[in-house]
Image: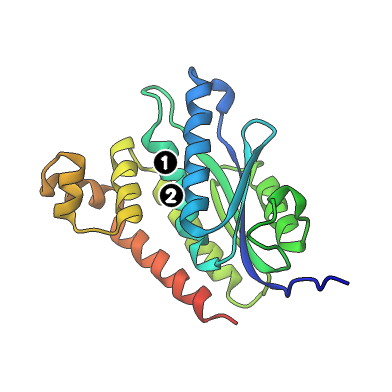
Amino acid sequence: MQNKPMAQRIAVLTGDLVDSRKASDPKRLFQVLDTALEAICDRFGGQGERYRGDGFQIALPDPVAALPAAVLLRAALVRHSEEHQRWDARIAVAIGEDRWQPEQRVTEANGEVFVRSGQALDAMSAGSSHLCLSLAEASGNECLALLTRFVDDLIDGWSRYSAETVYLSLWHEESQQALAKRLGISQPSVHKRLRAARWSLLDEYLRYLGQRFKDDP
């Protein structure tokens, strides 16, 4: 008899594209989404799939990667937006214990954390939010949910240039001088873009949550 894997804390991101039917080039939009999903899963050792056209789900074995992955995915979409339409996604992040393993397809998983992430996305569809965080434990959940609402509002204000600069900052974790060379612009221009994106606040938020999830049993 094969032993079942032990339950462990994982992160599940369930999302869908915003107004994908209005895109003048839906093929390119879906290519951007698929490329971002693949890159994020490769980076964080997770599994992700797109379903029902513009829906997607990602499972990550390390909860510390949950919010960086969500921000990277939204930044990837915004940076490649069409001139007259902003590309973005609603993403519901849930963290909890599950027996899911990295080699298992997310479509084969139906644990509580997967269900909770999907339910959180359904709840978001009725409002204007594009990012939410749900924890299994009640303690501190409301505070983190409120912080995430602030970050969601921050991301909603990004231009394509700000999104690109944040995306590369998260992906490469390099100095502004190195980032300027990568973008082919000056270091003061990089600083201006990051300031417009409220990068310092976003970075503190991600570091805080990363430490919080790392310390949780």
Closer to us: 50 or 189: 50
Q: Quadrant of residue 164?
A: top left
**In the rendering, which numbered label is found on residue 72?**
2
Q: Residues within 10 Å of mark 2 (few under 14, many from 20)?
A: many
Q: Are marks 2 and 1 in contact (CB under 8 Å)?
A: yes
Closer to us: 157 or 90: 90
Q: Quadrant of the C terminus?
A: bottom right
Q: Quick check: 81 left or right of 173?
A: right
Placement of 204 over or under 36, stated as above or below: below
Q: Name the residue rendered at 45%, 75% in the picture.
A: 211
Considering every residue shown, the one lying at the far top of the view is 24
Tag 1 secondary structure: helix
Query: Could you tell me residue 145's position as x and y percent?
Result: 55, 63
Q: Name the residue rendered at 47%, 42% in the picture.
A: 36
Placement of 167 over or under 2, stated as above or below: above
Q: Quick check: 96 left or right of 161?
A: right
**CA–CA distance in space, label 2 to label 1:** 6 Å
Query: Could you tell me residue 84's position as x and y percent?
Result: 39, 22
Q: Quick check: 114 left or right of 196?
A: right
Q: Quadrant of residue 7?
A: bottom right
**In the rendering, which numbered label is found on residue 76?**
1
Q: Name the residue rendered at 41%, 47% in the picture.
A: 155
Q: Quadrant of the N terminus?
A: bottom right
